[in-house]
Structures are given as C-alpha cells and as structure tokens.
C-alpha cells in the first residue's frame, strides 16, 4: 500500500551550522540568478557560476545587490586580467552592453587589450604627452563643451591640486574661478571651444573682480592665482614635460558611441602626476561624453591599476561622485588592484567610500599579510581568510573567492581556446608553442571595422 507524502514526511531537526557542515559535507553553496554570463564553475558544487551585476541589481533577482560595482584584487599572474577580458567578450554578445576600459598595463608601447581590440576591429585610443597634432597622440580637453561648466571647474581644481601637491587656498580658488569664467566668455565670443591656455591667459592678465561687495584689483588677482598659473604652465607650455595632452580641443575621431572603448595608457609614465592628471580628466569626460541620459544601454567602466584613483584624493573625489550615482547612470564600475595595504584609507574618505560602494569583490591569491588586511577590511569569513594565502591549491591561478552581496563562493574561471589566446599575458614566460588542447574555440563577433573606439 502506497503512503501519502504527509505520512512519509520526517520531522525537522535543529542543528548548529558547525554540526551541519560535518553532517552534510558534500553540499555546495546555493546558486544565484541563472541569467547573465557564465564565469566558470563553483568549485565545491561543480555548478555553473553565472554573474551579471545589472541583473542582480533587479528586484526580481534571487540575490539582490545594492550596486553593480566590482572590486578585483590579487597578485599578478593569478587571473585578474583574464577574468575582466573574458567577461567583456561574453557580455558584448548582448546588444545593450557597452564597455570602456582604461588599459594601464602592457609591453612594447601597446596595452594588454590591443589583441582583443584588433580581433574586434576597433582602434585603441593611445594617450601620450607631447604634440598631439604632430604624432599619434590624442588630446582630451578637460574643458570640453560636453562637460557642464560647473564640472569643468571641479576638474580644473583637481588638476591644480595634483600639480601643486595639496588643496588650493581659498583665494587661489577664487582667482581660478574668475579666470575660468572669463576664459569661457572670451572663447564663446570667438565661437570656439575654451581650452586650458585661455584660463592661463585669464589668470595672468585678469580684470577687476568682485568678492562680495569688495573690489579685487588685477594685481591682487595675479598674486592670488599664481599657484594655479604655475600649475597650468606645466600643461600649456610646449617646453614642459606634461604639455600636449590637455591643452587644446579634443582630438577628432574619438568614437564615444562605440560598444567597446579602450584607452591605452601604457605610454604614460607610471610615477609622478601624469596618470592622476589623466584620471582626473577622464572620469567626468566619460560621464558626460560617454554616458547618454535616457537610453537603455548598460555601461561598464573597467579601470586597471585603480590605485591611481584611490591614492589621490582629488581624483577619488571626482570618481566617488561617478560611482555613487552609478545606479542612476546605468553604470557598473570595476576597480582592479593588486592589494589594499598601500592605501591609507583612513586618510582618504573618498577612496574608502568607493570601495564600500562595491557590492561584488573578486579576490585572487594574496600574501598572508595582505590577505589579513583585506579580510579585516572586507569582513571575510574564516574559511575565505585561510584560503586567500593558499596560492598553490584553493586559490591557485584561475580560482578566486567571489563575495557577491552576502554570498561567498570559490569560483574556478573557465576559458575557451580563443579566449585563452586573447587573454594570455604570460607568453614570454612560458614554453608553449601550440594551441591549448581540450578547450573549445568560439568565433569572435567584430564590432566596427576601422573605427576609433
């Protein structure tokens, strides 16, 4: 005689999580939403691991994320670059996904994304200091008309603070604001775009201004604005090392409507003010030139070597605003770093705010000291804290701990043969000469032939 379901149902038992782990050792972590792109497999259950920050932000998702921003950490050679590249290649198959990459790593004068760009039929935007009109460099105008005037002034202040090494004095900021206003008026009267040299001219030959009801004469304005003028001279004087990249109208041919935009930063010096200056300009420039209000495109901004943003307060201040309004802009921000230990987050509230806004953290192998610092800051579980320093087994190359909201999984990244060829950055250190065996090849979909993306 068959028994009904109610007759065979067993009574529930109460247990602690510690005992349950021993009683049911083969049970893997629960999956997330099945929509999105496959990253690889969850190491303990063997199930496909699927991720899409835009889908997980949706209220109907199984795991609801408060933001679409991602932090990627780990030592070199363990899979950070491969992850971000394959993620982009897979997401590009969806029509409503656009990407912008700040490529700061590479060799022989080209970035790591150069091979992918060639395969997709796009041309990276190569940024170099010097005469942009004479060589193959590209100029980006921080006073581009696509950036609203109030944000232009924020960019100016940030650039001056980077060059002068500290916050501007109130009287210097006043003189800079008057010079910017005069430069915009003068350029508008000549029906052309305002550029940095216009601001320098206005700083060094100002007109009388009003500070409340007090009249401020030209000589006093010159004295007040001298620190900003000296900083601007570094960018506008052709004989200076930093000249050429920012002074002048934005170069022609930069396609901000392309589905993939790659800014190649590898020819810029890593040390000094060059990289922070570019980051200070490119954040607002991307926000107002690349992100189009009212459309349905989901955009992802990937910043390699993101410590150039987090370690400079003027730059972090601009990017914090961009990241904070990411949900309103339809933006997912990916910060790719090697470690957190070099960042004094207590002295940089803007950088700490950016990291706190990331709802997804992908953690590759770290040295023990780095792992302890990271685990404390991110609030990792005990097993994840122990796994991070194990670079030979648990967190071997290609394996990472994914902290997505409140869920933590160990994920093994899987690539096709085509993706391995396009994302391999270890060719010069390995002896492999042939293609990888056992990985299926996947055809690539060209985007736009000959376009500057």
Image (cartoon, grey):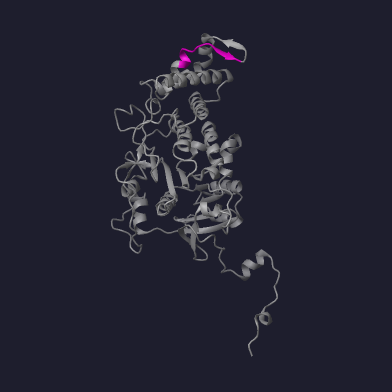
Residue situated in front as seen by the camera: 278 or 436: 278
Q: Is residue 187 above or below residue 125?
A: above
Identity of the residue drawn at 51% across and 30% down:
151
Residue 379, percent across and down?
Answer: 61, 50
Q: Nearer the viewer, residue 185 or 365?
A: 185
Query: Image quadrant for the N terminus?
Result: bottom right
* Number of numbered markers: 0
Q: Position of residue 44 (x, y in %)?
A: 52, 64
Question: From what the image shows, is residue 388 above or below residue 337?
Answer: below
For image coordinates 34% across by 36% down, the residue present is 253
Residue 13, magenta (yes or no) = no
Percent coordinates x, y for residue 359 in the rendering = 56, 49
Q: Is residue 260 visible?
A: yes
Quadrant housing the C terminus: top left
In this view, the residue farthest toward the bottom is 1
The quadrant holding residue 258 is: top left
In the visual, does 231 lie left or right of 122?
right
User: Which residues are the magenta region?
Assistant: 202-211
Q: Quadrant of residue 126?
A: top left
């Amino acid at each position: 005689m068959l028994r009904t379901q109610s007759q065979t149902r067993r009574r529930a038992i109460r247990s602690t999580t510690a005992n349950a782990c021993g009683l049911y050792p083969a049970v893997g972590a629960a999956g997330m939403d099945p929509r999105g792109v496959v990253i690889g497999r969850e190491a303990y259950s063997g199930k496909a691991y699927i991720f899409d920050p835009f889908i997980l932000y949706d209220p109907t998702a199984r795991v609801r994320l408060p933001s679409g921003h991602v932090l990627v950490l780990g030592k070199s050679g363990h899979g950070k670059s491969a992850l971000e590249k394959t993620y982009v290649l897979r997401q590009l198959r969806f029509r409503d996904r656009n990407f912008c990459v700040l490529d700061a790593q590479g060799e022989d004068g080209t970035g790591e994304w150069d091979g992918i760009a060639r395969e997709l039929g796009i041309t990276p935007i190569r940024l170099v200091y010097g005469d942009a009109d004479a060589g193959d460099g590209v100029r980006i105008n921080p006073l581009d008309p696509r950036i609203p005037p109030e944000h232009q002034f924020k960019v100016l202040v940030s650039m001056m603070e980077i060059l002068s090494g500290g916050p501007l004095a109130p009287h210097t900021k006043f003189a800079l604001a008057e010079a910017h206003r005069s430069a915009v008026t003068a350029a508008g009267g000549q029906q052309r775009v305002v550029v940095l040299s216009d601001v320098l001219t206005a700083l060094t030959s100002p007109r009388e201004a009003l500070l409340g009801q007090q009249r401020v004469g030209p000589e006093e304005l010159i004295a007040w604005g001298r620190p900003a003028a000296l900083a601007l001279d570094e960018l506008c004087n052709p004989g200076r090392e930093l000249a050429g990249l920012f002074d002048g109208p934005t170069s022609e041919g930069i396609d901000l409507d392309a589905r993939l935009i790659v800014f190649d930063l590898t020819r810029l010096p890593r040390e000094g003010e060059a990289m922070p200056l570019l980051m200070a300009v490119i954040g607002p420039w991307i926000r107002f030139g690349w992100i189009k209000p009212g459309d349905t495109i989901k955009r992802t901004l990937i910043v390699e070597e993101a410590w150039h943003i987090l370690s400079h307060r003027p730059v972090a201040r601009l990017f914090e605003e961009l990241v904070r309004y990411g949900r309103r802009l339809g933006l997912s921000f990916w910060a790719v770093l090697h470690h957190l230990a070099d960042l004094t987050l207590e002295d940089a509230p803007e950088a700490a705010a950016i990291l706190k806004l990331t709802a997804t953290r992908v953690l590759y192998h770290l040295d023990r000291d780095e792992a302890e610092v990271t685990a404390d800051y991110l609030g990792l579980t005990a097993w994840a804290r122990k796994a991070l320093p194990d670079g030979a087994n648990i967190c071997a190359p290609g394996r990472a701990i994914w902290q997505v909201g409140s869920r933590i999984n160990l994920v093994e990244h899987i690539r096709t043969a085509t993706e391995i060829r396009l994302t391999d950055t270890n060719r010069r250190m390995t002896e492999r000469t042939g293609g990888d065996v056992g990985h299926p090849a996947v055809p690539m979909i060209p985007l736009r032939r000959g376009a500057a993306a």
